């Protein structure tokens, strides 16, 4: 997963003191039950099972965070149909399916929050960034479309356009000089001169999930230290 989801838990624990109801262990319970196996279950069945399990255990869906992702960036002529299909299925179709399944429950709840993780490249793509920038651009468009359609149902939909944040994917990519040296080099690309922390992402998710952002919907917020050249 390219998105820095590990930091969410820390913020969620702190946000409990502010009255937020936090679901921390649904996904972990799925793994423990030994049904979460991508080679055995399709994305469609996984999405259905996730919502069914959530409703079974918690009776409602308040917040949906579509955070799935994987690094996929190459030059146009090198990207095969399989790479395109896999990327679109993971980043767009999974989001569409989760929203389709969650929104009816949110309408019964008289509201809810959907947050889609995308990237600044979905607004301003660089060369050699396919297919991920196309998939993320579609995610930004989907966010605005859903926000417009479901505002009347008190369902807020926003997207966080993630820049260079510390995450496990960089640990895996780090060379012999180590991940800290990699972050030092990456930071040179960022106007603020640093790579973001997972907690930066988690704080923004917590804010957009809370009543403190009750008048915010249909936005694409850059979380990138000024890296994206467009607002």
Image (cartoon, rainbow, N blue to C red):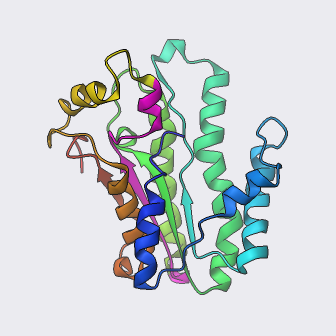
Where residue 191 sits, quadrant-wise, is: top left
**Residue stretch rendered in magenta on the structure:** 152-172
The answer to whether residue 60 is above or below residue 26 is below
Q: Residue at x 42, y 26 (%)?
A: 129
The answer to whether residue 14 is above or below residue 1 is below
x and y, in percent, of residue 122 in the image = 40, 41
Residue 18 highlighted magenta (yes or no) = no
25 relative position to 17: left or right: right
x and y, in percent, of residue 2 in the image = 49, 39
The answer to whether residue 93 is seen in the rendering is: yes
- Tell me the quarter of the image containing the N terminus: top right
Q: Residue at x 82, y 43 (%)?
A: 41
The answer to whether residue 144 is seen in the rendering is: no
x and y, in percent, of residue 188 in the image = 17, 29
Q: How many marks?
A: 0
In depth, the one of 140 and 42 nearer the eye is 42
In depth, the one of 188 and 17 nearer the eye is 17
Where residue 181 sits, quadrant-wise, is: top left
Where residue 230 sits, quadrant-wise, is: top left
In depth, the one of 25 and 189 nearer the eye is 25
The answer to whether residue 107 is above or below residue 44 is below
Residue 155 highlighted magenta (yes or no) = yes
Q: Residue at x 34, y 23 (%)?
A: 178
Q: Residue at x 51, y 82 (%)?
A: 154
x and y, in percent, of residue 3 in the image = 47, 45
């Amino acid at each position: 997963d390219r998105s820095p989801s590990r930091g969410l838990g820390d913020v969620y624990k702190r946000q409990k003191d502010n009255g937020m109801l936090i679901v921390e262990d649904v996904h972990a319970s799925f793994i423990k039950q030994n049904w979460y196996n991508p080679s055995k279950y399709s994305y469609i069945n996984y999405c259905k099972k996730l919502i069914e399990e959530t409703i079974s255990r918690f009776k409602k869906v308040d917040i949906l965070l579509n955070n799935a992702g994987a690094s996929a960036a190459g030059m146009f002529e090198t990207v095969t149909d399989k790479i395109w299909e896999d990327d679109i299925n993971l980043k767009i179709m999974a989001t569409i399916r989760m929203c389709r399944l969650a929104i009816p429950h949110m309408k019964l709840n008289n509201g809810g929050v959907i947050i889609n993780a995308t990237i600044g490249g979905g607004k301003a793509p660089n060369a050699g960034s396919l297919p991920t920038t196309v998939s993320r651009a579609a995610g930004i468009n989907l966010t605005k479309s859903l926000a417009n359609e479901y505002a009347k149902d008190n369902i807020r939909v926003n997207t966080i356009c993630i820049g260079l944040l510390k995450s496990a994917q960089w640990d895996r990519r780090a060379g012999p000089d180590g991940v800290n040296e990699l972050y030092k080099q990456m930071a040179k690309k960022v106007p603020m001169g640093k790579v973001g922390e997972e907690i930066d992402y988690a704080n923004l998710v917590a804010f957009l999930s809370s009543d403190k952002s009750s008048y915010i919907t249909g936005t694409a917020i850059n979380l990138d230290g000024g890296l994206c050249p467009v607002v």
